Image (cartoon, rainbow, N blue to C red):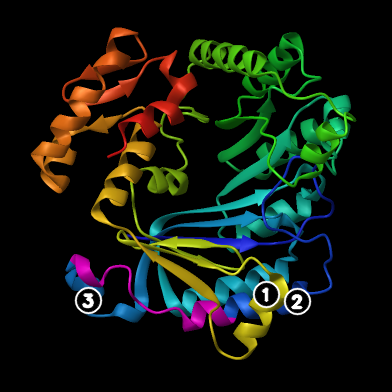
């Protein structure tokens, strides 16, 4: 069953490190919701036509959806009524699976007791909270909209409201984050018994405010060695606390992985709605224009403004190499052989010997799995294995 990603391109203010598509001007919020609803209605039933699913083939306009993810931007900036409008449009077009996972990204300053209850009533059963840090100084350095007090308080509110499944984001490797500060951040996650944590190294993306400030010597550059050290420390702390390191950046209590994000790494199909949103049908990717005004104008005229790329077999294989190596399950050589041919599987197997000899990768029952140290070099190893 496919999933759905909906991009909500609005934020209260711009974080210095962020290069996602968003606007801090909320004047178009109502029109944006209308445009997303129109796109949902116009979207063709195409994801499962080639899979031969008899149930879906009998009713292509009512595909069953296994996950729904509101990302951004800041989806929690939407009012309850705006979310209801989107839900109604989705339920006109799709059938939600009985065990559907519905995730809403939220910032701590948007989280209130009233909103939490309303989100649960809508069917949202998972939150992804952009905490980034529990340290006031670091939040100001990043130009986050919330405070350290709000970071901590929102967790208690979420648990009191009845959310069993939720995640928090943390960032490591900033110039002002010491190892002791990083330990305090992670310890707080463990003490609060948070079921899922996503951790990302601070990345200096081109054309962001952080990139410009570093170039002007207004902020210190990141230290790659420090980032590697803090990632290694993170893996040790989370393992000791009983979390499963199921993907490079993600840790979960048993049974509480992100179903939606896991579908990306396993190559599942998914729809995507909203400006800059990317969809995938197994053989092609399509992405909407990353411009709010153009997106709205096109949908007002009944046209979805997107581009599309048809993936070659080699590109499909390389994507599998990249995504599978990031996971705890690893790269399955038998799968490569069955789908892409025994010759390509043999080429990959031959190419990994140098990583096995240096302890960065291990072969377990026909699967190639990154070691603790190897996870530091995941992207480089994957790129080296590309065909």
Res. 255 visible in picture: yes
As displayed, is residue 325 above or below residue 227?
below
* Quadrant housing the C terminus: top left
Which residue corresponds to the image point at 47% horizontal and 41% vertical from the top-left? 258
Whether residue 356 appears in magenta in the rendering, the answer is no
Res. 247 visible in picture: no
| Span highlighted in magenta in the image | 38-51
Other residues around mark 1 within 10 Å, as few (<14) / some (14–19) / many (≥20): some
Which residue corresponds to the image point at 74% horizontal and 24% vertical from the top-left? 174
Residue 268 image position (x, y, % from top left): 34, 53
Q: Are marks 1 and 3 in contact (CB under 8 Å)?
A: no
Residue of label 3 = 57
Other residues around mark 3 within 10 Å, as few (<14) / some (14–19) / many (≥20): some
Residue 340 image position (x, y, % from top left): 16, 46
Could you tell which of marks 1 and 3 lies nearer the N-terminus? Answer: 1
Secondary element under disc 2, as helix, strand or loop, is helix
Could you tell which of marks 3 and 2 lies nearer the N-terminus? Answer: 2
Give the Cα distance between marks 3 and 2. Answer: 35 Å
Give the Cα distance between marks 1 and 2. Answer: 5 Å
Give the Cα distance between marks 1 and 3. Answer: 30 Å
Give residue 30's mark.
Answer: 2
Which residue corresponds to the image point at 26% horizontal and 49% vertical from the top-left? 314
Give residue 33's mark.
Answer: 1
As displayed, is residue 28 above or below residue 350?
below
Which residue corresponds to the image point at 65% horizontal and 57% vertical from the top-left? 119
């Amino acid at each position: 069953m496919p999933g759905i990603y909906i991009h909500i391109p609005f934020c209260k203010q711009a974080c210095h490190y962020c290069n996602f598509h968003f606007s801090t001007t909320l004047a178009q919020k109502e029109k944006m919701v209308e445009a997303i609803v129109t796109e949902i209605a116009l979207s063709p039933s195409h994801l499962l036509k080639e899979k031969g699913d008899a149930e879906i083939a009998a009713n292509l306009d009512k595909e069953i959806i296994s996950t729904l993810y509101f990302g951004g931007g800041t989806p929690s900036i939407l009012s309850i009524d705006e979310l209801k409008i989107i839900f109604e449009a989705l339920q006109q077009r799709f059938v939600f699976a009985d065990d559907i996972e519905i995730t809403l990204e939220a910032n701590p300053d948007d989280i209130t007791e009233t909103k939490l209850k309303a989100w649960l009533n809508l069917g949202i059963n998972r939150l992804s909270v952009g905490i980034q840090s529990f340290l006031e100084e670091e939040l100001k350095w990043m130009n986050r909209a919330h405070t350290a007090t709000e970071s901590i308080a929102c967790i208690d509110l979420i648990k009191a409201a009845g959310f069993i499944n939720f995640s928090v984001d943390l960032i490591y490797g900033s110039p002002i984050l010491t190892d002791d500060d990083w330990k305090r951040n992670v310890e707080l996650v463990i003490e609060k018994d948070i079921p899922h944590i996503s951790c990302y190294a601070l990345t200096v993306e081109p054309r962001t405010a952080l990139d410009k400030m570093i170039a002007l010597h207004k902020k210190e550059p990141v230290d790659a060695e420090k980032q590697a050290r803090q990632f290694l420390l993170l893996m040790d702390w989370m393992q000791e606390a009983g979390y499963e390191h199921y993907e490079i950046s993600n840790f979960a209590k048993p049974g509480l992985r992100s179903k939606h994000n896991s579908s990306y790494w396993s190559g599942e199909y998914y729809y995507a709605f909203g400006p800059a949103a990317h969809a995938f049908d197994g053989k092609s990717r399509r992405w909407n224009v990353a411009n709010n005004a153009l997106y709205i104008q096109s949908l007002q005229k009944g046209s979805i403004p997107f581009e599309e790329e048809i993936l070659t077999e080699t590109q499909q294989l390389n994507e599998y190499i990249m995504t599978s190596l990031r996971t705890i399950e690893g790269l399955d050589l038998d799968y490569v052989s069955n789908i892409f041919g025994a010759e390509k599987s043999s080429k990959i197997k031959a190419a990994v010997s140098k990583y096995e000899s240096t302890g960065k990768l291990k072969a377990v029952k026909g699967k190639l799995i990154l070691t603790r140290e190897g996870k530091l070099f995941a992207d480089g190893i994957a790129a080296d294995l590309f065909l």
